Amino acid sequence: MRKAVIVLSGGLDSTTCMGIAKEKGYELYPITFHYGQKHNIEVQQAQKVSQFYNTKDHRIVDIGFLQQIGGSALTDSSIPVPTDMEYEADSIPSTYVPARNMIFLALASAYAEVIGAEAIYIGVSAVDYSGYPDCRPEFITSMTETVNLATKQGVTGGSLSIETPLIHLTKKETIEEGLRLQVPYHLTTSCYNGGETACGKCDSCLLRIKGFKEANGKDPIAYEIKVNW
Ligand SMILES: [Zn+2]
């Protein structure tokens, strides 16, 4: 069976990628990174998602040393998580983690090579977070070339593709796709504040709530605030 590595955060987008890769007929090999994120609960949720899909193997890789580099509202306790969802065009939000997806994809490609996977799925979207440079198609194209030049698999006739099925989808469209695939959204978390219950106020919660509303769905997770679905 063809294998795919899924960069699985336990959030809505990466869990949707699990459903998409499964529908494509891949055997799923999720990899989750513990990178010192404030919303560390993601890692537990990723384990639940992995169990839901009955995966043979799920790597949880500790790269908490990213905290030593800091520079992001998600990893640096001195930078607050923004709550206004007001991104200026061409500005990069403080939730950007420096070079995160480049680091994730480098490690995912190493894992892919070890298990003989032919694809890596990553749930980036250039629509909702267009401020993040490592979510853009140009970066993915370049990184695909790089991992094929940097791995034994790539230079000995095999190839590794980086699949980004959500890259041109809005949050609404991603959720519609996930609902069609019966993705376990009840097991996912998106809140940047990382509580047991989603805050409903941070950028990520606001985007998620908006997406479910536009998709005419009801988010199955609990929020600290009352949401009128
Ligand atoms: Zn939140």
Image: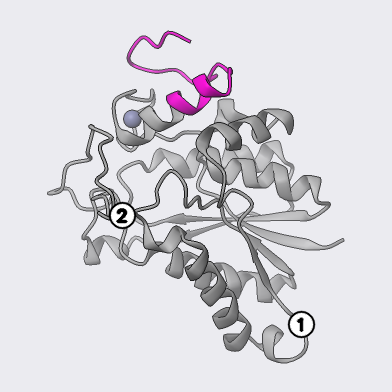
Q: Are circles 1 and 2 on residues that touch, CB within 8 Å? A: no
Task: Provide residue 72's location: percent of width, then percent of height.
Answer: 24, 55
- Between residue 36 and residue 15, name the one nearer to us: 15
The amino acid pointed to by label 2 is Tyr
Q: Which residue is mark 1?
A: 158
Residue 191: image tag: none
Magenta stretch? Answer: 209-229
Residue 86 seen by the camera? yes
Task: Provide residue 22's location: percent of width, then percent of height.
Answer: 77, 47
Looking at this rendering, what residue extends furthest in the front direction?
89
Q: Residue at x 67, y 35 (%)?
A: 177
Q: Residue at x 36, y 9 (%)?
A: 226
The image quarter in which residue 197 lies: top left
Looking at this rendering, what residue extends furthest in the bottom direction?
156
Q: How many marks?
A: 2
Residue 96: image tag: 2
Task: Provide residue 112's location: percent of width, then percent of height.
Answer: 66, 70
Quadrant position of the N terminus in the picture: bottom right
The amino acid pointed to by label 1 is Gly
> Seen in the image, is 29 located left or right of residue 226?
right
- In which quadrant of this rendering is ligand 1 seen? top left
